[in-house]
Image: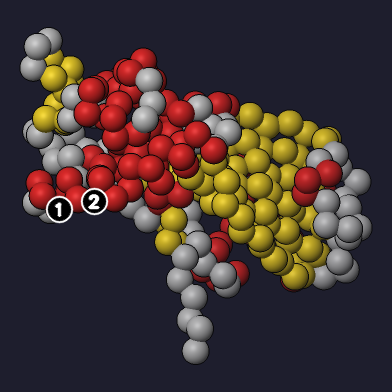
């Protein structure tokens, strides 16, 4: 994109962007940091280029200089920009890209989705009850075994999951296997011919402070939230989970004809 095209694009969107920043409940400096990251990722601000100075950005977005400096501090901490005295701010590198994770919609594909991933169990607890968020109105197990797990590919986190497995089924599998193997594979093995219907729900959200820190992503990063439910053949809810997928690491494909 030429400098003239960038200038025209900027002039045409100044009021819209400025008003949008002020309407959101999210802190303005966090919104600006996201916008600046996108400008770097898209090549609008190429690696090695000088970023417009604070005076120019203050005029473009109609925000305080201190707010822009706060956004810059976030990008600097992430190693994306460098600020040089008397010279300005420069783009050091683009945000790291991450391989897309396919969110499949059939059981066979779903059970294979995490093959090859580095799965780490962060916390686990036995004999717990299902939280209201994951109740679907069906018969519940007497108790569940809870897992909080982090999934990585190529060293980058793509999923943070909180899962509840029927305690009885948990006892059918060697405990050490739950430390790093995909839960749905173990569920399928434990339930065998008793496995019944399964469904999942996808929604869009953003990362709060805890999720962002655990997933090693910026605060308010886009997320795809998945709620998944698996029932036994008699209708009992034997597995329920809530998964947070990085929004930039999700690929959803559906045949519509």
> Where is residue 107 shown, x and y percent of the image?
60, 69
Given residues 177 and 112, the one toward you in this image is: 112
**Residue designated by label 2:** 9
In the depicted structure, whether residue 193 falls above or below residue 12: below
Name the residue rendered at 63%, 29% in the picture. 123
Quarter residue 47 falls in: top left
Q: Is residue 253 visible?
A: yes
Circles 2 and 1, Cβ within 8 Å, touching? The answer is yes
Secondary element at tag 1: helix
Name the residue rendered at 51%, 83% in the picture. 256
Secondary element at tag 2: helix
Query: What's the mark number on residue 13?
Result: none
Given residues 210 and 196, the one toward you in this image is: 210
**Residue designated by label 1:** 5
Rounded to the nearest angstrom, the CA distance separating label 2 from label 1 is 6 Å
In the depicted structure, whether residue 257 falls above or below residue 160: below
Q: Residue furthest top?
A: 85
């Amino acid at each position: 994109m030429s400098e003239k095209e960038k200038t025209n694009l900027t002039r045409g969107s100044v009021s819209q962007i400025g008003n949008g920043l002020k309407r959101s409940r999210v802190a303005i400096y966090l919104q600006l940091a996201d916008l600046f990251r996108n400008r770097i990722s898209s090549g609008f601000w190429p690696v090695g280029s000088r970023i417009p100075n604070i005076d120019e950005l203050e005029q473009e977005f109609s925000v305080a200089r201190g707010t822009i400096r706060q956004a810059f501090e976030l990008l600097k901490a992430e190693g994306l920009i460098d600020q040089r005295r008397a010279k300005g701010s420069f783009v050091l590198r683009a945000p790291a890209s991450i391989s897309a994770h396919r969110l499949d919609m059939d059981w066979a594909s779903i059970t294979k989705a995490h093959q090859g991933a580095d799965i780490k169990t962060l916390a686990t607890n036995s004999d717990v009850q299902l939280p209201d968020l994951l109740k679907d109105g069906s018969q519940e197990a007497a108790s569940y075994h809870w897992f909080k797990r982090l999934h990585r590919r190529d060293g980058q986190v793509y999923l943070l999951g909180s899962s509840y497995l029927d305690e009885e089924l948990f006892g059918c599998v060697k405990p050490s296997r739950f430390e790093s193997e995909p839960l749905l594979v173990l569920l399928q093995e434990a339930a065998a011919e008793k496995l019944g219907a399964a469904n999942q729900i996808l929604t869009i959200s953003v990362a709060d402070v805890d999720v962002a820190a655990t997933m090693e992503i910026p605060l308010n990063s886009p997320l795809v939230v998945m709620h998944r439910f698996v029932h036994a053949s008699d209708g009992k809810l034997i597995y329920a989970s809530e998964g947070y997928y990085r929004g930039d690491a999700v690929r959803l494909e559906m045949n519509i004809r």
